[in-house]
Image (cartoon, grey):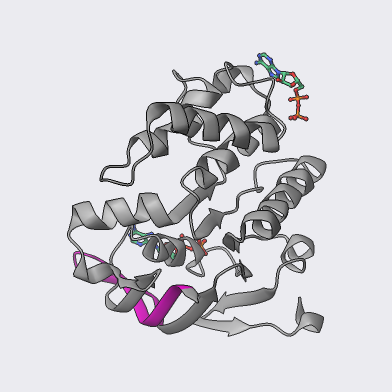
């Protein structure tokens, strides 16, 4: 089962008369449970690719399919709902809401769900608590982001990304802001959640040592996506 697919994906930014072609005709399939690293120099287009995969930006040409649904065929509202339901996001900076506790931050994506299958607040709270425990933050449920360490905030962000049981987590340098040891811990955590829950991972990283631990390593270079052989990583 393919959870994420790109077909002929192209992006050119245009601002007035300035055109910045980023990539052209990318093809990518990510299967359920698969882990994929995306390497590439600064400016190669890694963030752009993740934004397109997550339906946060629209391609200049080509299509993105999330769990089989063509993103461009959806209304903005339906695209937002699919994104919240099927994908989780982890960024370099945690983007937790400062006024809310860790537990509330992790519950929020569940509470934003609409429709007949959306869980109750009690169920959201139970699952958020369970996830925070599994990332080692069972003793930090009522702490606000400002009261957590860098590593703890990033682990809370991972819990938040997983709370709707997404098919795939997209990470843009998810450990880029952490020291080496904490980065390895957060990376291990994402890999263990991948193994236990079958969540696919697509992680943009600069860190080749971390990338090597994923099933596939792709490099974005001069507008093309190429799979690296193990000895190239
Ligand atoms: P990476 O994540 O690999 O560093 P980006 O996807 O951020 O690369 O950027 C790819 C290219 O697109 C760069 O040349 C960048 O300057 C340009 N770019 C990124 N975002 C925009 C934007 N919103 N408008 C115009 N150009 C952009
Ligand atoms: P880490 O190695 O995970 O980044 P730190 O050394 O930054 O950990 O923090 C150690 C402990 O101190 C953590 O358990 C964290 O909850 C607590 N802590 C860090 N910063 C604050 C703060 N501003 N307010 C309250 N507790 C904090």
Percent across and percent down for residue 97 are 44, 27
Residue 210 place in picture, x, y as percent: 75, 60
Dominant secondary structure of the residues highlighted in magenta in the image: strand
Name the residue at 75% across, 65% down. 208
- Please provide percent x and percent y for residue 157: 56, 38
- The residue segment tinted magenta is 3-24
> What residue do we see at 77% from left, 44% from top?
185
Quadrant showing the C terminus: bottom right
Tell me the quarter of the picture where residue 68 sits.
bottom left
Q: Is residue 101 above or below residue 61?
A: above
Tell whether 104 sits left or right of 214. left
Q: Would you identify the image quadrant in which residue 87 lies?
A: bottom left
Front-lying residue, 93 or 133: 133
In the visual, does 114 lie left or right of 197?
left
Front-lying residue, 164 or 221: 164
Could you tell whether 228 is left or right of 126 in the image?
right
Q: Residue at x 44, y 82 (%)?
A: 26
> Is residue 113 at least partly visible in the picture?
yes
Q: Which of the 4 image quadrants contains residue 227?
A: bottom right
């Amino acid at each position: 089962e393919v959870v994420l697919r790109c077909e002929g994906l192209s992006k050119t930014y245009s601002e007035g008369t300035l055109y910045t072609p980023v990539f052209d005709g990318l093809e990518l399939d990510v299967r359920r449970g698969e882990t994929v690293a995306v390497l590439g120099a600064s400016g190669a287009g890694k963030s752009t690719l993740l934004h397109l995969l997550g339906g946060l930006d629209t391609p200049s040409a080509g299509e993105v399919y999330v769990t089989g649904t063509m993103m461009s065929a959806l209304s903005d509202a339906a695209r937002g709902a699919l994104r919240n339901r099927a994908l989780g996001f982890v960024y370099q900076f945690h983007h937790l809401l400062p006024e809310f506790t860790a537990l509330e931050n992790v519950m929020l994506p569940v509470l934003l769900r609409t429709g007949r299958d959306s869980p109750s607040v009690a169920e959201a709270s139970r699952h958020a608590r369970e996830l925070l425990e599994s990332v080692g933050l069972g003793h930090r449920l009522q702490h606000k982001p400002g009261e957590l360490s860098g590593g703890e905030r990033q682990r809370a962000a991972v819990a938040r990304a997983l709370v709707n049981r997404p098919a795939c987590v997209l990470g843009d340098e998810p450990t880029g802001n952490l020291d080496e040891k904490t980065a390895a811990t957060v990376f291990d955590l994402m890999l263990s959640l991948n193994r236990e829950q079958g969540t696919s991972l697509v992680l943009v990283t600069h860190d080749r040592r971390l990338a090597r631990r994923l099933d596939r390593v792709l490099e974005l270079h001069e507008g093309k996506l190429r799979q690296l052989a193990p000895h190239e990583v």
